[in-house]
Image (spheres, coloured by chain):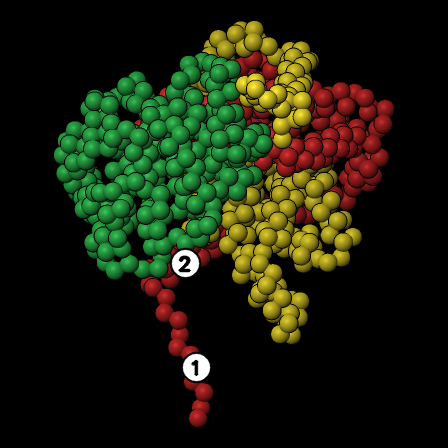
């Protein structure tokens, strides 16, 4: 709305500003805050344009050391890579199973009890904030080095993500067929199986594949803390300055992730 | 003045959009093009501002053949010709004022327009245009907060701000309800008479065509099959143009 | 009259074959997975019994003395994420335009753009961090670079999807007005995309905060360095504090960013 004092006096020609005062001040304040934050954070982290200028030639120098990649250690790499993928598959499977009851509890339209809904939701949100590395470190502390720690860490990590995605899908479902089933005398379990599941199933599989992708990427790094997989191998090579071998590992990881993502995307497109 | 001389348009897939069009439109006229969907009305109108390009013939606007225009000449032509669309084509999230100012973009330097440094005269002109369609109080509202009829009026204001010599309207009322449609057509007619801007409108409603047009051009399958003053037009003429008997959906209704 | 069973549903052969193939593949993968994985359950169980009381109770008894130090490092984490995220949000814009089919006429460029973005997205952030630590040393700068490069991939893809879904008729209307390409960009295209771009950038910031909190583990600055020390020293009280701060800060950031994103669109 045009403010009273901006109204033209009769007889004058009125040229309104392109943006009203309110918008202009808002945007200016926001801009100043952002720039201020940027300056402050760049000071604290010592990241400036000059560090970029000196950093880039340095980077180029170092990257040259990584080539040509040395594929001698391929046997060990493949074995570890297999372990990485296996960890991700197992973890995703268990996460998918566990998230079925959890996401039902966290969906407002299925769980009428507000306290349960709220508690489960908050629990899942907290799970989602914990970085995978921290979980891995804790499990290694409990169970020792090895794939088991990694798998458990991944399960907890992906449970939060998957349950949130699924519960949101459940909340967006069409309730009318479910109402109709309740009205015809079906009990809760039957209603869920015949009314809810068919609507959610394609999205469910799509999300499971999506979380599988995430878990494979996460599984790669868990090795760093000793939780199994290829991460440990990469870290060792770098610590020993075996850069060409490290590059070989990176290339293999990259190829594996790209291929799996590609397959997963194709399957997801076919499902939904 | 707009002059079509043997203008034809053949699409890449072989269909003919326009077949040998010969017609002259004089300054200040209010012309309505009628015909069924696919008859070529839209192609005809869009040739004038080169949103489509005829494949043969000559199209003269103010004495110059525009068919080979490129770059600067083309943009210069388009600043002279204003266009109103069926779907209003406003930037939904921008304010009404910003949308109307877009009409001056052709006259504003690129650098100035990026920083929204429009001249005072342009801003005043935009405001005046909004007053002419009685919507100046919605100056800073987001375009998608307005109703269909209001958005079309903003569209008209945008075209007015261009100060064009010609106004083209491609099915301007097809998305609006009957009372609003008449309101929009009345605005177009008023502007044509007050500013003496040549106006060419595409309509497929018979009653609206007969009510607002001075001259009616009928098209069928890419050809002009009728061209004459509205006084000479009857329902029979429309049956000839359409090539079929008239139906109820050909009428808009709702005239006050 | 006896009731008849309904006729069996006829499924096209190709679809049935495809479904069987997928089922077989999935079963094969599972067999490979569960037989291939080497887990010594006995040893793990033994370890767990020994370590449980050393780890879990201490985790839940955080070391409050380190609170200010941990918060300090967490702020550093946030700054790393902020700079990295912001740079990526800006740099991904031209890449997004390049990969959008309605902005770039050249099919080769759009496909190449999409492929480059997918390639970048394949790298786990931590691997990028390791590489950058090797390249520029163990400082926050490495973290910023890792975050920036990692985010460009996802943002670039999302940006190009937003661009491909805008209303091109608005562009047509401005062309009809006589505006040139740059004016159309600023007045027709940008107003349509800016809210979504901002929303995605803020969403990515949430993810980047999480990513930044671990980068320090490999030396790229932030709270990850503390994670490394606590883990190496088996100092579970400290770890508990770190966990607490991370959960707190990330939750607050998530809530804020959710609120802002709702207001924008």
Residue located beneath label 2 in the image: C19
Find residue B10 and report its horizontal and vertical position in percent: 18, 38
Q: Which quadrant of the figure has residue C20?
A: bottom left
What is the letter of the red chain? C
The mark lying in front, picked from 1 and 2, is: 1
Between C210 and C231, the residue placed more toward the observer is C210
Find residue A7 and report its horizontal and vertical position in percent: 62, 24
Q: Secondary structure at mark 2?
A: helix
Q: Which quadrant of the figure has residue C67?
A: top right
Q: CA distance from mark 1 to mark 2?
A: 26 Å
Find residue C69 and report its horizontal and vertical position in percent: 79, 20
What is the letter of the yellow chain? A
Up-down: is A220 above or below B161? below
Instruction: Answer left or right for B31 relative to A184.
Output: left
Image mark 1: chain: C
Instruction: Answer left or right for B36 relative to C229.
Output: left
Q: Residues within 10 Å of mark 1 (few under 14, many from 20)?
A: few
Residue shown at 23%/47% (left/top)? B232
Between C109 and C239, the residue placed more toward the observer is C109
Residue shown at 41%/35% (left/top)? B190
What is the letter of the green chain? B
Residue located beneath label 1 in the image: C5
Toward the front, the furthest residue is B231
- Label at residue B34: none
Between B110 and A121, the residue placed more toward the observer is B110
């Amino acid at each position: 709305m045009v403010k009273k004092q901006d109204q033209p006096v009769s007889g004058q020609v009125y040229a309104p500003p392109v943006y009203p005062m309110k918008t202009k001040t808002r945007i200016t304040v926001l801009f100043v805050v952002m720039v201020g934050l940027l300056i402050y954070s760049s000071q604290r982290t010592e990241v400036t344009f000059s560090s970029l200028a000196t950093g880039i030639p340095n980077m180029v120098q170092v990257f040259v050391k990584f080539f040509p990649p040395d594929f001698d250690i391929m046997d060990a790499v493949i074995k570890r890579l297999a372990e990485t993928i296996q960890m991700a598959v197992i973890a995703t499977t268990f996460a998918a199973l566990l998230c079925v009851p959890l996401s039902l509890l966290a969906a407002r339209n299925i769980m009428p009890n507000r306290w349960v809904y709220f508690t489960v939701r908050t629990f899942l949100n907290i799970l989602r904030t914990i970085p995978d590395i921290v979980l891995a470190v804790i499990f290694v502390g409990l169970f020792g080095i090895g794939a088991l720690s990694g798998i458990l860490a991944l399960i907890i990590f992906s449970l939060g993500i998957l349950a949130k995605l699924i519960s949101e899908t459940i909340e967006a479902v069409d309730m009318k067929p479910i109402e109709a089933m309740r009205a015809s005398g079906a009990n809760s379990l039957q209603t869920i199986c015949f009314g809810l599941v068919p609507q959610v199933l394609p999205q469910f599989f799509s999300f499971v594949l999506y979380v599988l992708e995430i878990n494979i990427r996460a599984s790669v790094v868990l090795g760093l803390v000793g939780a199994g997989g290829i991460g440990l191998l990469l870290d060792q090579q770098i610590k020993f300055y075996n850069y060409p071998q490290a590059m070989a590992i990176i290339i293999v990881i990259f190829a594996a992730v790209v291929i799996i993502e590609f397959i997963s995307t194709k399957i997801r497109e076919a499902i939904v | 003045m707009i002059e079509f001389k043997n203008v034809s348009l053949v699409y890449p897939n072989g269909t003919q959009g326009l077949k040998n069009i010969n017609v002259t439109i004089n300054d200040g006229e209010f012309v309505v093009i009628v015909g069924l969907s696919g008859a070529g009305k839209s192609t005809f109108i869009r040739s004038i501002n080169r949103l489509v390009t005829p494949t043969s013939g000559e199209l003269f606007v103010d004495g110059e053949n525009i068919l080979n225009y490129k770059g600067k000449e083309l943009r210069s032509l388009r600043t002279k010709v204003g266009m109103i669309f069926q779907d209003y084509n406003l930037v939904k999230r921008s304010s009404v004022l910003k949308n109307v100012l877009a009409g001056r973009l052709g006259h504003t330097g690129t650098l100035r327009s990026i920083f929204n440094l429009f001249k005072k005269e342009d801003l005043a002109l935009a405001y005046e245009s909004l007053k002419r369609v009685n919507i100046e109080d919605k100056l800073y509202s987001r375009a998608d907060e307005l109703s269909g009829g209001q958005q079309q009026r903003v569209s008209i204001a945008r075209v007015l701000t261009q100060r064009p010599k010609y106004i083209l309207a491609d099915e301007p009322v097809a998305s609006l309800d009957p009372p609003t449609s008449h309101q929009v057509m009345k605005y177009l007619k008023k502007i044509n008479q007050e500013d003496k801007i040549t106006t060419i409108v595409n309509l497929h409603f018979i009653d609206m065509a007969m009510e607002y047009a001075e001259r009616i051009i009928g098209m069928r399958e890419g050809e002009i099959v009728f061209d004459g003053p509205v006084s000479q037009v009857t329902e029979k003429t429309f049956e000839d143009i359409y090539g079929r008997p008239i139906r109820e959906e050909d009428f808009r209704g709702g005239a006050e | 009259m006896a009731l008849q069973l309904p006729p069996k549903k006829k499924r096209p052969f190709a679809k049935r074959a495809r479904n069987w193939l997928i089922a077989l593949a999935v079963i094969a993968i599972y067999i490979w997975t569960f037989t291939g994985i080497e887990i010594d359950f006995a040893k793990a169980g033994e370890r767990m019994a020994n370590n449980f009381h050393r780890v879990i109770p201490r985790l839940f008894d955080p070391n409050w003395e380190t609170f200010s130090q941990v918060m300090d490092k967490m702020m550093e984490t946030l700054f790393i994420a902020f700079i990295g995220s912001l740079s990526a949000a800006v740099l991904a814009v031209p890449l997004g335009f390049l990969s959008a089919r309605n902005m770039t006429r050249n099919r080769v460029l759009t496909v190449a753009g999409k492929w480059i973005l997918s390639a970048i997205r394949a790298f786990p952030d931590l691997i990028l961090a390791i590489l950058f630590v090797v390249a520029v040393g163990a400082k926050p700068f490495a973290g910023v670079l890792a975050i920036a490069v990692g985010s460009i991939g996802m943002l670039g893809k999302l940006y190009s999807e937003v661009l491909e879904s805008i209303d091109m008729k608005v562009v047509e209307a401005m062309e009809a007005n006589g505006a040139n390409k740059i004016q159309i960009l600023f007045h027709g295209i940008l107003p349509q995309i800016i809210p979504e771009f901002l929303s995605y950038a803020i969403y990515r910031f949430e993810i980047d905060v999480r990513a930044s909190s671990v980068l320090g583990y490999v030396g790229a600055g932030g709270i990850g360095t503390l994670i490394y020390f606590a883990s190496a020293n088996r100092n579970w009280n400290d770890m508990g504090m770190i966990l607490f701060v991370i959960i707190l800060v990330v939750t607050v950031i998530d809530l804020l960013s959710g609120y802002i994103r709702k207001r924008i669109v």
